[in-house]
Image (cartoon, grey):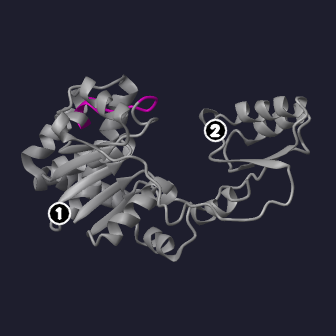
């Protein structure tokens, strides 16, 4: 039995897509989330069922928390105290991170106490920050192996006890050669690094054939509306195309915190008749249909 630890269950398409493949392979697992998502990126029945079956850690039940903190030193013996020592004195990126990791140690004890009589064989964390800390300490207390998949924000902006996670992981999933080299630079054993690229299900993501009725081309882009996705640059490029006299339309699918800024930019460049933002996140099943419109 594998216990997956995530920050927000299947809110991330990455989590949902990967775990659905684990499910199809017949591998037993339990999906854990620090918090269950309010929304997720799939509309299929399997996704709703998976979300319903996700075990959510938060909100913590006060009485259970008190009892777990009393019981954990008794149940886990020396492992509890070595893990606590690590939380207090291990290598940390900042004082804030040390406090956060200590809190997550106690959350891990809260999570692990009920699992002691039905221990998982392995614990894997998607993303290496908050959920990764709970997973690492949970595996430490339960005396089972631990692994994680790192991405970007968890390895850089919100890094938490990363060196300890690298050192304690039985293996690390690397989503690129860059990630593999990143871990090697931090002392990871190359034999523990497994590259799993961010692939696509080609049975789902394939072009939908359709006839073209005019010479006006459509530029399509989809993603979360955040700075790193480059939508500002796309809209400015649309302004350049308009100034060069090209006929086109641009449709941007997605939602996110940058939406208001992008709409203002469209107005400033007077592109309202050429650039449209849907303002809605695309469900995974709808992406092929959306992308076939270009």
Q: Is residue 42 left or right of residue 290?
A: left
Image vertical order of residue 248 relative to residue 230, above or below: below
Residue 106 in view: no
Q: Residue at x 32, y 57 (%)?
A: 4
Q: Residue at x 25, y 62 (%)?
A: 2
Single out the residue that lies furthest toward the left. 78
Of tags 1 and 2, the one toward the viewer is 2
Residue 246's spot in the image, x, y percent? 87, 37
Q: Is residue 203 left or right of residue 280?
A: left
* Number of the label disc, if any, that sits on residue 25: none
| Disc 1, SS | loop
Residue 156's spot in the image, x, y percent? 42, 29
Main secondary structure along the magenta-highlighted residues:
loop
Let me know if residue 160 is in the magenta part: yes
- Please tell me which residue lies in front, 65 or 58: 58
Q: Is residue 254 left or right of residue 271?
A: left
Q: Residue at x 29, y 57 (%)?
A: 111
Name the N-terminal-most of marks 1 and 2: 1
Magenta span covers which residues?
A: 156-165
- Which quadrant does the N terminus fall into? bottom left
Residue 227's spot in the image, x, y percent? 64, 33
Let me know if residue 249 is in the magenta part: no
Q: Which residue is mark 2?
A: 226
Q: Which corner quadrant of the image does residue 30 belong to?
A: bottom left
Image vertical order of residue 163 relative to residue 70, above or below: above
| Disc 2, SS | loop
Q: Which residue is mark 1?
A: 119
How many other residues sit within 10 Å of disc 2, few (<14), some (14-19) or many (≥20)? Answer: some
């Amino acid at each position: 039995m594998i216990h997956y630890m995530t920050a927000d269950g299947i809110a991330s398409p990455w989590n949902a897509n990967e775990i659905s493949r684990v499910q199809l392979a017949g591998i037993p697992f339990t999906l854990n989330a620090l918090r269950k998502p309010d929304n997720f990126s799939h509309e299929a029945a399997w996704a709703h069922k998976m979300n319903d079956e996700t075990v959510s850690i938060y909100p913590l039940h006060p009485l259970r928390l008190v009892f777990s903190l009393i019981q954990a030193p008794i149940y886990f013996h020396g492992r509890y105290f070595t893990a606590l020592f690590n939380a207090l004195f291990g290598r940390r990126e900042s004082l804030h991170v040390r406090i956060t990791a200590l809190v997550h140690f106690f959350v891990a004890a809260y999570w692990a106490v009920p699992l002691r009589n039905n221990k998982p064989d392995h614990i894997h964390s998607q993303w290496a920050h908050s959920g990764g800390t709970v997973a690492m300490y949970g595996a430490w207390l339960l005396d089972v192996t631990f692994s994680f998949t790192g991405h970007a924000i968890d390895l850089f902006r919100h890094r938490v006890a990363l060196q300890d996670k690298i050192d304690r992981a039985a293996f690390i999933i690397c989503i690129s050669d860059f990630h593999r080299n990143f871990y090697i630079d931090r002392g990871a054993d190359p034999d523990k690094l497994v590259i799993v690229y961010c692939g696509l299900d080609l049975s789902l993501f394939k072009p939908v054939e359709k006839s073209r009725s005019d010479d006006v081309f459509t530029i399509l882009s989809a993603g979360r509306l955040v700075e790193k996705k480059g939508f500002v640059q796309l809209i400015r490029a649309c302004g350049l195309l308009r100034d060069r006299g090209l006929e086109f339309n641009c449709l941007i699918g997605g939602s996110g915190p940058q939406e208001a800024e992008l709409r203002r930019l469209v107005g400033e460049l007077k592109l309202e008749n050429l650039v449209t933002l849907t303002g809605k996140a695309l469900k995974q099943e709808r992406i092929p249909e959306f992308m076939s419109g270009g």
